[in-house]
Amino acid sequence: MFKTLSSKQNSTVIFDQHKAELGQAKTRLFNVPIAIAYTHFSGLLWALPATAQTALVLYMVGFALFTVFSFLNILYRPGNYPIRRLANMAGDYASLAIVMILGQTTAMPLYALILWVTLGNGMRFGQRYLLIAAIMAQLALLALILGSEYWRSQFELMVTFSVTAIALPTYALMLLRETARARDTAQVATLAKSRFLAQASHDLRQPIHAAGYYIGALRGSPMNADQVNLVNRIEQTLGGVARLFKSLLDIAKLDSGTIDVRAEPVALKPLIDEIISNNEQFIQWNDIELRTVLVDVTVDADPTLLTTMVQNLLSNAIKYSPGKKILVGVRRRGSSASVEIYDQGVGIDGEHLPYIFEEFYRGHAAGDHDAEGVGLGLAILQRLVALCGFSIKLDSKRGVGTSVRLSGIPISQSHMLPPAHVDNTILRPLAGLRVILIEDDINVLKATETLLKRWGCVVQAFAKMPEQAADADMIISDFELGASATGAQAIAAIRTQLTRALPAILMTGHAEESLHHRNTPEDVIVLAKPVQPAALRSVLSSIRTREFNQS
């Protein structure tokens, strides 16, 4: 059903095949000394005539060298080379047949290696190679009969050998086919689930996104203390729903194997500062005193995945440390860096620690504060850590607090200019910022327009790609604009019309990384819905400041 492989899936298949072939080569390295030792200590070698002894020794030395060469070739030349694989299989059977022809009764135990080689190649390389190995095993037994009067005289034994060399691979073939069918069924189910979530995510994110902007606009209205408190509670609840929804989508994407790691130089301090800034409201609501000790270091990492990992760690610390202190730090550790978070929260009993990274596991005791979430944050974190090649260590003590260390983040060797210093005194408010807003969902369009106008922006709002737009300072567009066009196409058209590359933001309800494969310009900022009002305002301010500095 699914015949084409992505580049990532193809790379994974090649890696698995190389690993299997290398494993078989290691087995051969192990078996050759055993066979040589057996011919020596069993007396097989010494029972032969002198000329046969010499021939056998020369052959064993030659095959040992061939085995070593084959191992090195597989080790340093990975890839799918059927001829190399078949040559190794033929060498195995030929060697066993020669020794058994010469050794006769003494060499009979080596028949076990014929079965070992047959099943080993089949189980490692799949059904086709199992069939080829079974045929080669029968040819090796036929060579015994043709090459030795002794084996011709052992009719019943040879029949037993032949039937066994057919029965075991046949049974293994049945198991492989059942396993392949189960794997294919699981893959189809996983792909169907991923497609459903990808399709549903856009529609589910839209109302959360719109509601967040209406709340942001409401904050700009005159309110008494009770009304402010009510708005705060609504925003907290909505934020909890958004975080839960994002966790479910993250775990689904990790299960489907669609996440690629795109490492690049990332300055840790600005990244963590931005994460803390985006959580400022959450920190205030929980009455937390947060301190940072951040070493200015640049690492090689995927900025999106690294942000998700640190965000999950910080969210957990905030949720379980209301009214307490949290310390966020960055340390250099040789050629790598670590992000460390210490809190004085409720802590975790030692009996829960071995299971804390399991999905939906929550290390709570009776009477604990019922923090939001379903126990996916640390499960997502552990999978991302493994995907990126980092390591994670969590220590906790009930009633004392928790410390988590995300380590093994390689320090970048690339030259990277330090981030430009922005003088806050020249930052201008968003008042007067001219924005072209494109969104096909009317509720989201009205909510975003209302919020932008509250901030003082001058907004041109369109429910589809505009045929004509007035001059502006910035474009904000949804990615999916119905049948008319995509947001990327709308941005390109407006830039062409206004004859300049306006700064642009794409907001999408799809997986953010999927836009990299859909002709999205590199200079367009991509934000995954729901986008918090504070995050949007921060991005707009940053763009306006940059444009002001360049003018």
Image (cartoon, rainbow, N blue to C red):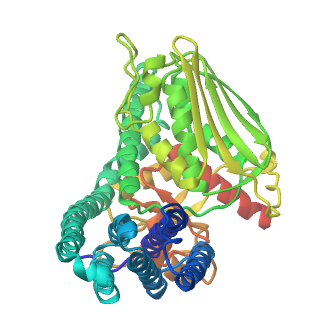
Check the picture and name the quadrant holding the N terminus.
bottom left
Quick check: 28 left or right of 154? right
x, y percent for residue 65: 62, 78
Residue 258's image quarter?
A: bottom left
Quick check: 285 left or right of 129? right
- Please name the residue shown 43% across and 19% down the image: 351
Whether residue 341 is situated above or below residue 483 in the rendered picture:
above
Whether residue 435 is situated above or below residue 243 in the rendered picture:
below
x, y percent for residue 448: 43, 54
Front one among 351 and 529: 351
- Quick check: can you spot residue 539? yes
Whether residue 202 is situated above or below residue 395 in the rendered picture:
below
- Please name the residue shown 31% across and 49% down the image: 207
Front one among 430 and 352: 352
Check the picture and name the quadrant holding the C terminus.
bottom right
Residue 372's image quarter?
A: top left
Quick check: 188 left or right of 214? left
- Please name the residue shown 49% across and 43% down the image: 382
Residue 109's image quarter?
A: bottom left
x, y percent for residue 256: 36, 59
- Quick check: can you spot residue 214? no
Q: How many marks?
A: 0
Front one among 334 and 220: 334
Whether residue 338 is situated above or below residue 35 in the rendered picture:
above
x, y percent for residue 161: 24, 71
Front one among 169 and 363: 169
